[in-house]
Amino acid sequence: MQLPPRLRPTDAATILEPTTKAAQKRKRTKKAEPPKSAVRALTLIDVRMPQELGGGTIPGSEHIPLDNILDTVPKSIPDPQAPVVVYCKSGMRGGMAQGALRKLGYTNVSNIVGGFDAWQKAGLPVTVS
């Protein structure tokens, strides 16, 4: 189907282009990047029990057992929009931690599907202490 000449995309683009000097200046101006302080660091939380940590942890993770998550996270992560990723051994307790944090008002919480087992199986880095 052919569009009538008055509705061809090239004509529409020409009509919609800014013509005033102020509009052209806005078009040339780059979007400002957020200040470095506005970039939020990801918090990685291991919700496994202490006796499970012998097999290793994901580098950079913070250990907060599932039993303590409701008391500890609000103190250590006061911003409810901060990105948080939780994990356990297989993903089940990580999912429970994710749900609990969402009920506390955290809006950017994720769970590593398959947990630490899936992380290891994928060959991703592990810290053993």
Image (cartoon, rainbow, N blue to C red):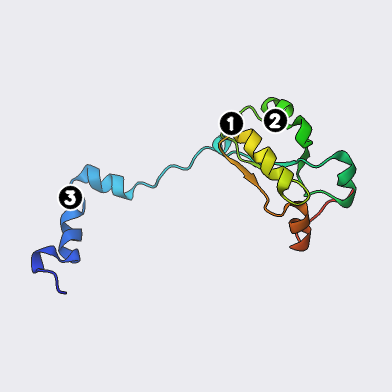
Q: Is mark 3 on a helix, strand or loop?
A: loop
Count residues near mark 3 (Cα–Cα under 10 Å), then give few for <14, some for 14-19, many for 20+. Answer: few
Instruction: Say what amino acid the circle numbered 2 marks.
Output: Val
Is residue 86 visible in this depiction of the protein?
A: no
Q: Position of residue 95 (x, y in %)?
A: 67, 44
Instruction: Say what amino acid the circle numbered 1 marks.
Output: Pro
In front: mark 1 or mark 3? Answer: 1
Task: Classify 64 as above or below 127.
Answer: above
Task: Classify 114 as above or below 1.
Answer: above
Residue in view at x 19 percent, y 65 percent: 10
Q: What element carries label 2?
A: helix
Q: Mark 1 points at which residue?
A: 80
Q: What separation in Å lies between label 1 and label 3 (alpha carbons)?
A: 44 Å
The foreground one among 39 and 26 is: 39
* Left or right position of 92 against 57: left
Residue in view at x 73 percent, y 25 percent: 71
Q: Which of marks 1 and 3 is nearer the N terminus?
A: 3
Q: What separation in Å lies between label 2 and label 1 (alpha carbons)?
A: 10 Å
Residue 104 figure quarter: top right
Q: Where is residue 12 in the image (x, y as percent from the top left)?
A: 17, 60
In front: mark 3 or mark 2? Answer: 2
Q: Which of marks 3 and 2 is nearer the N terminus?
A: 3
Label annotation for residue 73: 2
Q: Position of residue 79 (x, y in %)?
A: 60, 29
Label annotation for residue 19: 3
Residue in view at x 81 percent, y 48 percent: 57
Q: What element carries label 1?
A: loop
* Left or right position of 107 against 55: left
Is residue 25 visible in this depiction of the protein?
A: yes
